[in-house]
Image (cartoon, rainbow, N blue to C red):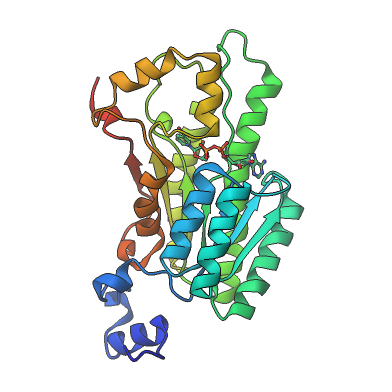
């Protein structure tokens, strides 16, 4: 590729004369397989925790980033670091305050991100739906309103995020990638944790992924996958451990690598799912849990 050629120009050149059914964006160099150059990615829950760490990963992969969160402001130190990276690399970075359960507001933010991306010359390419909430309550006591609130944020919020991301992709004719952050708790019940609403919501996200992949793979070429983390040390798990410190011992008993996860452990998996390297992967779940689900 000449230094001035864009990735899509290189793809076109590579695929010249190849029937469309046999074209794959993965037919490219190792570097390009994991590159998000000239692409804009939206990240919900991008105000802190896993989301803001993945925002940094997208910038490092050459992508432009739009973070969306219900928080008035993103976490100060992490955001300052992102701004530094974005500035040094000439990449776009924006923060949008919105509630993923408010469809009108969310649609408006995706329109803004679409316009920002066009101005950057880096079409909107996909999203990471990372916004989520957790709550530890026993099932015998679980209030209906709380159970429904968890489903509204974790399930409806992820669906609305995917829906509005896909609407922009379809409008622009972009064959993009959508990553939904689920959890190993969508597949297993966590010993010692009374989180039926959360676990139910994450199983729903995994099934939503398969259904959306089925609808959007053809003719739109939009891929949808879930990334299912195991235990990660973030504000979410700190809250759980604050009320039940004994949980850490139970979690460590299942930690085959003798440690809990850090948000950085999900940088490479998220970039893989977004980038051309995973172009034959859709409707799949990538579980990254330090081996937790591999042992009884
Ligand atoms: N921490 C873990 O061990 C773990 C494990 C598996 C999966 N996950 C998932 O990873 C994702 C990120 O979790 P985290 O650990 O970084 O937690 P976190 O609480 O630090 O981050 C969640 C973010 O989502 C935002 N958010 C919550 N409700 C929202 C709404 N209605 N609209 C917009 N934004 C909203 C929060 O403000 C926050 O910034 C979640 O989906 C979580 O379920 C976390």
Residue 246 lies in quadrant: top left
Relative to the observer, which residue lies in front, 221 or 27?
27
Judge from the rendering whether residue 196 lies leftward or rightward of residue 217; answer left or right.
Answer: right
- Residue 134 locus on image (x, y percent): 57, 28
Residue 44 visible within the image: no
Q: Residue furthest right?
A: 104
Judge from the rendering whether residue 95 lies leftward or rightward of residue 154; answer left or right.
Answer: right
Considering the image in quadrants, where does the N terminus appear?
Answer: bottom left
Residue 232 lies in quadrant: top left
Relative to the observer, which residue lies in front, 242 or 5?
242
Residue 123 lies in quadrant: bottom right
- Residue 225 locus on image (x, y percent): 41, 51
At x 28% / y 26%, what residue is drawn? Answer: 255
Considering the image in quadrants, where does the C terminus appear?
Answer: top left
Check the image and report above or below for 121 versus 196: below
- Residue 161 locus on image (x, y percent): 60, 52
Check the image and report above or below for 276 versus 118: above
User: How many marks can you see?
Assistant: 0
- Residue 125 locus on image (x, y percent): 51, 68
Report ligand 1 position as a quadrant.
top right
Relative to the observer, which residue lies in front, 169 or 265?
265
Residue 181 visible within the image: yes
At x 61% / y 32%, what residue is drawn? Answer: 151
């Amino acid at each position: 590729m000449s230094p001035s050629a864009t990735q899509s120009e290189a793809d076109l050149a590579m695929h010249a004369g190849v029937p469309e059914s046999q074209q794959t964006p993965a037919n490219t160099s190792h570097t390009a397989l994991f590159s998000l150059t000239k692409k804009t990615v939206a990240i919900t829950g991008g105000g802190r925790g896993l989301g803001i760490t993945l925002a940094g990963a997208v910038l490092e992969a050459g992508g432009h980033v739009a973070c969306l969160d219900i928080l008035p402001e993103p976490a100060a130190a992490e955001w300052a670091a992102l701004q530094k990276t974005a500035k040094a690399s000439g990449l776009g970075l924006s923060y949008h305050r919105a509630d993923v359960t408010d469809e009108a507001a969310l649609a408006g933010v995706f329109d803004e991100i679409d316009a920002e991306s066009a101005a950057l010359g880096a079409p909107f390419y996909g999203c990471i739906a990372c916004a989520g909430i957790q709550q530890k309550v026993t099932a015998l006591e679980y209030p209906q309103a709380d159970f429904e609130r968890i489903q509204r944020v974790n399930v409806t919020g992820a669906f609305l995020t995917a829906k509005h991301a896909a609407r922009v992709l379809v409008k622009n004719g972009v064959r993009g990638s959508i990553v939904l952050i689920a959890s190993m708790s969508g597949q297993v019940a966590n010993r010692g944790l009374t989180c039926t609403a959360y676990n139910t919501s994450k199983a729903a996200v995994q099934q939503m992924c398969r259904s959306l992949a089925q609808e959007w793979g053809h003719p739109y070429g939009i891929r949808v996958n879930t990334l299912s983390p195991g235990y990660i040390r973030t504000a979410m798990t700190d809250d759980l451990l604050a009320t039940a410190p004994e949980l850490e011992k139970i979690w460590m008993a299942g930690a085959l690598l003798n440690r809990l996860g850090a948000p950085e452990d999900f940088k490479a998996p998220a970039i893989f799912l977004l980038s051309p390297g995973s172009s034959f992967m859709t409707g799949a779940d990538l579980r990254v849990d330090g081996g937790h689900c591999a042992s009884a």
